Amino acid sequence: MATKRYAVVLSDVHIGNGAPTCWYQQRVHEPQLSAALRWILANRETIKEVVLLGDLFDVWTYRPAVRPPSLREIIAANPLLLGPRGPLADVVRALPGEVRLLLGNHDGSVTRADIDELNRSLGGNVARGERVEFVDAPMRVVTGASGARTVFAHGHYQCMFNAPDARSRWGTIPVGHFVSRAIADQVSRTPARGTAADRVNSGNPTGIDLNALRAAVARRDDLAAFLLQYIERVTGMSRYAPIVMPDGRVTTAWDAQRVFAGLYTLWRTREGRWEDALRAANADRGGGDDLAWFGQRLAMQTGSDLTVMGHTHSAVAGVDVSPVDYVNNGYACVSLPDAVTGTPTTFTRVDVERATAQVFAVAPFGASIFPTRVRRLRSAIVHGRDYSCYARIQNNTGRPLIRVAVGRDSASYWVVPPPMMIQPGARFDAWLQDTPLSPRGSEGSFSYSDGARTYSFFVTCPTVRDNKVTSPVPYETKVGSNPWRAGRVDGSGYPLQARFYVGAARPVTRGWLPPAGRSRQPAPVP
């Protein structure tokens, strides 16, 4: 019998009410989405759960003068897809209690009551679990029987312009909402070009020039004002045009500019470094490669082996040089001209027992579904070279390891520092990164005590000297794409990975995962 070991991830479908400004259009996208849902049904014997990873619905892509629809109106506009005889209803009946929905930025105002409305439309037996489970959290961690862990998150929480903003006057709707309304205004003023689904680069239609963004940061410009003024120039929407918000209140882009003033300063304080705030400003631009940095950090913070995100509409199959992995689900609402030029509708199948992922493509009109090759990133550091030190500590002593000291070179930064305590049988990944403008690379130290003995460690990945690792316990290292070395380190190359096995000899297998029952200890997520 087949083993239920897979999670299937769908994201960024952007189902709306069918207005011409909506990215999702039934005639274009319903065949592909229905085909993906039927594929889930056909493979249900191997599927542990279905993760609807944000932006399943869309209340952003509407003309400024129009109030965005409620979820009830979106359901009514898509009866074949979201009704009791539709493919989503079939999936919730086939996998009771295993279909879960997380919110993205475009559907971030959807509530639990809205999902109850959706479940009534689907017509399943709620008492038997035939429903969409609402995950009221920014992430979900799934642990397989093997101990492998995967964290699922839409990704917008790591993006400056689209993360929920507590200063907002409209719930937590961020400044990015106003960008989508301006793009919808542009589409509505050129009806001869068809709907949003008939246009090139729909879903990523207004990229921000990175050099202009850097210059704005250097000038200490307010980035909310920079973004809205930039979009005004590109789309032609007046900053004073009335915008009807999802709650029915009326505002303007000019008002939003004042509400979200100080956005960069807020993120600079939140992240602690200007370079990480700049990554957040650039994380959903173009291909969204900077999101990989945040995905790698999230995996380490939650003790996971893999992060799966969406949001950027650009599929990523993995990161080559990292102690963990990052995969992006891509885009399930590809416009017709983009599909013709080779951009596929994609979804992801995750093996939760190995924390590995495979991206699948849906042919136009749902003709076939097949594994597809999409791009990989060499490193989560996509601007410049990665002279990081990645340290994995495995506690096999039978006693808690208490951190005694932690240090770093002045040009280095603990993105994920060694934790205060590592429980028996647990492991933890720490990440020491070099400062981008420094020529020295990274260098740091840390020590732990089990109550009877103190263990001191040192790691460095410099730009000009030799790499170095010192350890009182068995260890192995890997530099760049080189093989793993037991008890020694390659002198040149970057980044440096080191695995320290406290209380036991190192395992001999590469890519080792703790056996069933062993845990990974997550750090507190900021």
Image (tube, rainbow, N blue to C red):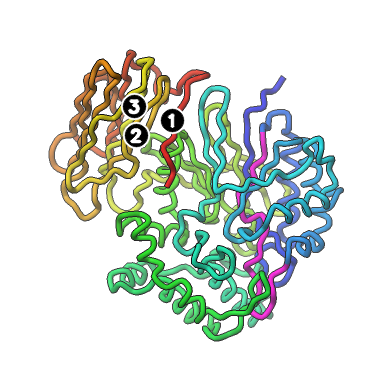
Residue denoted by label 2? 419
Point out the stretch of residues depicted in magenta. Answer: 49-69
Q: Is residue 358 left or right of residue 98?
A: left
Asked if the residues shown at circle 2 and circle 1 are in contact, with their CB atoms under 8 angstroms apart, the answer is yes
Q: Helix, strand, or loop for circle 2?
A: loop
Residue denoted by label 3? 393
Q: Is residue 433 left or right of residue 86?
A: left
Q: CA distance from mark 3 to mark 1?
A: 10 Å
**Residue type pointed to by label 3:** Ile
Work out whether mark 2 precedes mark 1 in sequence or the reverse, and give the earlier one.
2
Residue denoted by label 1? 521
Instruction: Identify which residue, 175 or 336, lies in the foreground.
Output: 175
**Residue type pointed to by label 2:** Pro
Q: Position of residue 355 (x, y in %)?
A: 52, 32
Q: Position of residue 214 (x, y in %)?
A: 32, 67
In the picture, the quarter occupied by the N terminus is top right
Q: Helix, strand, or loop for circle 1?
A: loop
Q: Is residue 373 left or right of residue 111?
A: left
Image quadrant of residue 340? bottom right
Work out whether mark 3 precedes mark 2 in sequence or the reverse, and give the earlier one.
3
Q: Main secondary structure of the magenta part?
A: loop
Q: Residue at x 62, y 74 (%)?
A: 184
Q: Residue at x 83, y 52 (%)?
A: 121
Work out whether mark 3 precedes mark 1 in sequence or the reverse, and give the earlier one.
3
**Residue type pointed to by label 1:** Gln
